[in-house]
């Protein structure tokens, strides 16, 4: 079975919401749509106070290069164009909408029919991805139209779809594969066409045998889709590791996947590509997991993007258990702890993960015993223990020389450290300092 | 509403801890301790208990009254040092007070003076042992006869170790490979039985506390190097199999050269470390003043560990 070669860990999988079918979350009364839901510059609001909007109507336009369109996930009246604190406490430009009914744009095909044929040319596909505001749903929210515009002189040879879902707890990609295998395969075919590559590889960790069987069966009906079972090892779904597992190639330090002829997209992205290209539906919904060991029930939902964390919690489980310690957006290895539950969800959110107080607590730090476990766990072949002391002593230049910027922040070092040293935190700080140093030199 | 915790990722931990590692090492030392008690009697147990108690006590006193920091004795690292120190001395009545001095040197000088666990460049138990060897040469080389469970007799006949006897001229009569493998030979308290040490080492390998690199490189190098010498002149040099089964090679390779703190981290560095230990051990045994060289070999290689760490980097993902 294929896997990446170096390092890695195996955290408890905890896929406890595996069997919960995707439910539809009701539309909330109030909606706040952030203009900055993607990597890059915020979109520019193109609506004003008092405007009527429909579901799927463009409300934020991508004017900068690295930017993506934002569409209204609800219908109603624009209350104001202002700012809003996001889930992590950062102030972002936002459009506030009073929800009235649920009136969709006429252009959107809401019938349940599945459309296989796509007659668009590659250039037209990319243009439509831009129009529909599609971004990568694997976590980085990289605008899809930029990823699929291959720069001059570069050539794509592989399209890799990341369905590893190696993060503990998360099951949204799994549910999409189980319930929408055909749409996913159509989406993958469209992306394959956009790139003009012969084959697309869907990498799935082998702890999802049902999904592997389902996707393999469905892929037979399509040309050039290969399902690739992967060993259960974290971070199998990290971009560079996935490329290494599927193709054996290695993305050099500071380079992009396209430099080794690869383009990687998340499985959720493929599904939203299907909806955008075949159904004219912009990216206005997320599929996310509501899970936690102490929750009374486990769920997977399709949610209008912009529904707040509190709305999701209220609808799914009523209220947070009294012993809640942490709410995480994403998985336990790379997800971010939510500061503000009143904040709206954004494109790419994959979960509301509720951790118990005891589970969320960090053990006290003890002395480094130089066991080297961090180094052997590092999938990038780095030396986390060394970064820790270099950063503490402000030896930033040396940290850079030891390739600190190659760190993908997967968390394997901290996870495996017997001294509980917050290595990943220290490396993040170090990376920021290295970047600041490089910016100052320019 | 309750305030939520926030922190950077990851939000889960493997639950591995220094404490677990150290207590597992202690577990792994139990078979060798049991064999020592079976062969050297109650003396072996008393020396071990005194050594462990002294190490723990010194660490606690230093932390409480000199460094004035919260005590860390529960992490079990002082117990490891105490056991290893006891394993490196003869199981005699004299040792019951001498080992206390060794414990003070091991914990006070080799460990706490450098800043405590994780910061010591040299293996504390080895420093303690070498201090005792140089300071108490007679007592440290007076080996009890392998005997019953209660050799409390003060006039206990002293035997020779295979290595000591060989240095004087020839192996003692009737020492077989099986004796050396099971531990039915003279020697330091915990080093005599290869099988007991290997059982402990297998446990550590299973629990992923050590990897095969250092023990295999150490023992392999000693075997090959002494084998070459033996092939050249089988009367002047010891049989290679006897070489690795006697003295402290097994104990040193499995438990002291694998100490995380004082040995290299990268696999390649660990191979170099093991190779150096094996080579130095055989050189000291054959051409040095002492019949045994494991402690000195490991101590010398401890010296170059920072250098090896600087030199042997892990393979970067893409370079």
Image: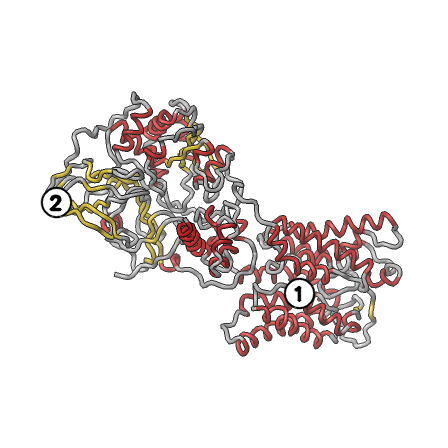
Q: Is residue A34 above or below residue A148?
A: below
Q: Quadrant of residue A225?
A: top left
Residue ID at (53%, 43%): A6
Q: In which quadrant will I find the C terminus of chain B?
A: top right
Subunit of mark 2?
Answer: A
To the question of a shared chain for discs 1 and 2, the answer is no
Which image quarter holds the N terminus of chain B? bottom left
Please tell me which residue lies in front, A397 or B105. Answer: A397
Q: Residues within 10 Å of mark 1 (few under 14, many from 20)?
A: many
Q: Nearer the viewer, mark 1 or mark 2?
A: 2
Kindly indicate the quadrant of the structure image that contains residue B6. Answer: bottom left
Pinpoint residue B20: horizontal percent, then vertical percent.
Answer: 54, 60
Q: Residue at x 32, y 52 (%)?
A: A295
Q: Which mark is residue A55?
A: none
Residue B172 vs A247, above or below: the answer is: below
Image height check: is B259 above or below B230? Answer: below
Q: Is residue A381 above or below residue A194?
A: below
Q: Is residue A223 left or right of residue A344?
A: right
**Between A161 and A257, which is closer to the camera in this rendering?**
A257
Asked whether B37 or B172 is in front, the reply is B172
From the viewer's side, name the closer residue of B66 and A213: B66
Q: Secondary structure at mark 2?
A: loop
- Return the x and y of residue B219 as percentages of the image width and height: 72, 52
Residue A224 shows in the view? yes
Parent chain of label 1: B
Q: Position of residue A363 (x, y in %)?
A: 44, 61
Residue B302 x %, y %: 66, 60
- Residue denoted by label 2: A49
Tell me the residue that label 1 is attached to: B84
Q: Answer whether residue A300 is visible to the viewer in this image.
A: no
Task: Say left or right for A331 vs B38.
Answer: left
Residue occupying the far front of the picture: A442
């Amino acid at each position: 079975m294929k896997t990446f070669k170096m390092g890695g860990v195996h955290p408890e999988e905890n896929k406890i919401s595996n069997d919960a079918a995707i439910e539809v979350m009701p539309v909330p009364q109030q909606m706040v749509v952030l203009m900055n839901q993607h990597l890059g510059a915020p979109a520019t609001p193109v609506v004003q106070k008092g405007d009527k909007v429909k579901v799927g109507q463009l409300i934020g336009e991508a004017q900068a290069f690295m930017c993506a369109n934002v569409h209204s996930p609800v219908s109603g009246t624009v209350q104001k164009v202002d700012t809003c604190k996001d889930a992590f406490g950062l102030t972002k430009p936002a459009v506030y909408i009073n929800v009235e009914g649920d009136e969709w744009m006429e252009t959107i095909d809401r019938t349940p029919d599945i459309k296989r044929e796509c007659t668009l040319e590659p250039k037209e596909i990319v243009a439509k991805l831009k129009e529909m505001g599609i971004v990568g749903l694997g976590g980085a929210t990289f605008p899809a139209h930029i990823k699929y515009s291959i720069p001059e002189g570069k050539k794509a040879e592989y399209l890799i779809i990341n369905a590893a879902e190696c993060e503990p707890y998360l099951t949204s990609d799994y549910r999409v594969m189980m319930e929408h295998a055909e749409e996913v395969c159509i989406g993958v075919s469209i992306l394959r066409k956009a790139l003009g590559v012969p084959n697309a590889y869907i990498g799935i960790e082998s702890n999802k045998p049902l999904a592997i069987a389902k996707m393999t069966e469905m892929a037979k009906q399509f040309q050039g889709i290969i399902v690739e079972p992967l060993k259960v090892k974290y971070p199998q779904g990290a971009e560079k590791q996935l490329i290494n597992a599927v193709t054996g190639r290695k993305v050099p330090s500071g380079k992009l996947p396209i430099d080794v002829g690869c383009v990687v997209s998340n499985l959720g992205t493929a599904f939203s590509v299907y909806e955008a290209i075949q159904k004219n539906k912009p990216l206005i919904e997320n599929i996310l997991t509501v899970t936690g060991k102490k929750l009374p029930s486990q769920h997977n939902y399709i949610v209008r993007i912009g529904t707040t964390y509190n709305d999701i919690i209220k609808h799914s489980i009523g209220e947070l258990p009294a012993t809640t310690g942490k709410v995480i957006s994403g998985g336990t290895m790379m997800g971010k702890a939510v500061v503000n539950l009143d904040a709206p969800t954004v494109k790419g959110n994959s979960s509301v993960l509720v951790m118990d107080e005891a589970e969320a607590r960090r053990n006290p730090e003890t002395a480094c015993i130089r066991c080297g476990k961090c180094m052997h766990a590092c999938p990038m072949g780095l030396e986390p223990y060394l970064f820790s002391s270099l950063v503490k002593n402000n030896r930033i230049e040396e940290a850079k020389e030891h390739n600190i910027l190659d760190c993908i922040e997967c968390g394997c070092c901290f996870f495996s450290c017997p001294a509980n040293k917050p290595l990943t935190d220290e490396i993040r700080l170090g990376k920021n300092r290295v970047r600041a140093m490089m910016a100052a030199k320019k | 509403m309750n305030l939520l915790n926030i922190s950077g990722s990851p939000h889960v931990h493997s639950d591995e801890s220094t404490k677990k590692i150290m207590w597992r090492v202690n577990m792994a030392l139990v078979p060798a301790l049991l064999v020592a008690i079976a062969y050297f009697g109650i003396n072996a147990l008393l020396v071990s208990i005194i050594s462990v108690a002294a190490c723990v006590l010194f660490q606690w006193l230093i932390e409480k009254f000199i460094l004035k920091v919260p005590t860390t004795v529960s992490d079990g690292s002082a117990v490891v040092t105490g056991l290893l120190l006891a394993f490196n001395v003869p199981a005699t009545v004299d040792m019951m007070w001498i080992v206390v001095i060794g414990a003070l040197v091991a914990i006070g000088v080799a460990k706490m003076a450098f800043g405590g666990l994780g910061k010591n460049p040299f293996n504390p138990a080895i420093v303690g042992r070498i201090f005792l060897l140089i300071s108490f040469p007679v007592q440290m080389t007076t080996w009890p006869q392998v005997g019953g469970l209660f050799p409390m007799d003060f006039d206990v006949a002293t035997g020779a170790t295979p290595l000591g006897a060989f240095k004087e001229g020839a192996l003692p009569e009737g020492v077989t490979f099986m004796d050396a493998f099971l531990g039915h030979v003279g020697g330091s308290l915990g080093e005599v039985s290869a099988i007991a040490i290997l059982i402990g080492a297998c446990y550590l390998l299973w629990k992923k506390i050590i990897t095969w690199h250092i023990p295999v490189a150490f023992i392999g190098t000693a075997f090959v190097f002494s084998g070459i010498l033996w092939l050249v002149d089988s009367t002047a040099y010891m049989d290679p199999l006897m070489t690795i089964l006697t003295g402290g090679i097994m104990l040193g390779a499995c438990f002291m050269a694998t100490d995380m703190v004082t040995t290299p981290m990268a696999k390649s560095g660990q191979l170099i470390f093991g190779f150096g230990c094996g080579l130095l051990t055989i050189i000291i045994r054959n051409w040095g003043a002492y019949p045994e060289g494991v402690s000195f070999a490991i101590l010398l290689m401890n010296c170059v560990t920072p250098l090896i760490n600087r030199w042997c980097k892990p393979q970067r993902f893409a370079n």
